[in-house]
Image: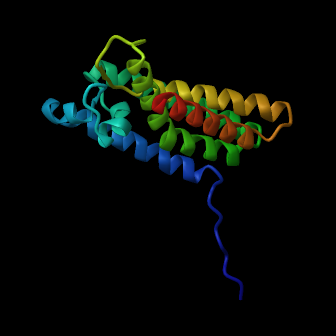
């Protein structure tokens, strides 16, 4: 007698990740303001927590809501297009990579720009950078899928190259 194994949807990992990101965003939104300040990226006083989590902290509800809705729209449209173009595997990889790596990349870029005096602020926060990273990544996915190029390899190479350039610039 064969057991009927149910297969998970190919977008299941991204859906789980997406809901975890939403939970993290909501968690940081409901934190008291004095605790939120520990997670804001301050270029004069860096902490490991703020380098990653500053992108999940928002000034107020309007700031939070705008980024929240933008993420919902980006994720929904990108997921729809990934399903339509049979790119769910690449979609999962890009979404997970964007959520895990882009906060570090964006923070190091901010730190680098502050180091060479190209930015005027001391503190940075919000999810807009990750939203922008997601838009760019998913546009690259669609472009390379249409051009029949392995988009996952191109995106990973792009991210690794950018990381390498940022690290060299920061430590030089």
Q: Is residue 130 left or right of residue 111?
A: right
Q: Quadrant of residue 121?
A: top left
Direction front: furthest residue: 172
| Residue drawn at point x = 38 percent, y = 31 percent | 55
Q: Quadrant of the N terminus?
A: bottom right
On the image, the x and y values in percent for residue 53 come to 34, 38
Question: Of 18 and 55, which appears nearest the observer?
Answer: 55
| Residue drawn at point x = 27 percent, y = 30 percent | 40
Compared with 127, 101 (above or below) is below
Question: Of 66 and 32, which appears nearest the observer?
Answer: 32
Question: Of 40 and 76, which appears nearest the observer?
Answer: 40
| Residue drawn at point x = 44 percent, y = 19 percent | 113
Q: Quadrant of residue 88?
A: top right
Question: Of 77 and 154, which appears nearest the observer?
Answer: 154
On the image, the x and y values in percent for residue 42 come to 28, 26
Colour convention of the picture:
rainbow
Q: Is residue 159 left or right of residue 109?
A: right
| Residue drawn at point x = 42 percent, y = 17 percent | 116
Compared with 123, 119 (above or below) is above
Q: How many marks?
A: 0
On the image, the x and y values in percent for residue 76 come to 57, 33
Direction right: furthest residue: 148
Q: Quadrant of residue 80?
A: top right
């Amino acid at each position: 007698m064969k057991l009927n194994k149910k297969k998970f949807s190919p977008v299941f990992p991204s859906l789980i990740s997406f809901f975890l990101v939403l939970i993290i965003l909501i968690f940081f939104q409901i934190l008291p303001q004095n605790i939120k300040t520990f997670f804001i990226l301050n270029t004069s006083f860096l902490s490991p927590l703020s380098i990653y989590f500053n992108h999940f902290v928002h000034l107020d509800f309007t700031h939070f809501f705008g980024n929240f809705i933008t993420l919902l729209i980006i994720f929904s449209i990108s997921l729809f297009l990934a399903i339509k173009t049979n790119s769910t595997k690449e979609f999962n990889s890009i979404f997970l990579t964007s959520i895990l790596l882009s906060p570090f990349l964006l923070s190091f870029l901010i730190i680098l720009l502050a180091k060479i005096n190209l930015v005027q602020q001391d503190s940075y926060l919000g999810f807009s950078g990750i939203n922008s990273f997601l838009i760019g990544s998913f546009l690259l996915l669609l472009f390379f899928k249409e051009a029949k190029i392995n988009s996952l390899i191109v995106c990973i190479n792009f991210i690794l190259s950018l990381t390498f350039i940022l690290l060299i610039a920061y430590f030089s």
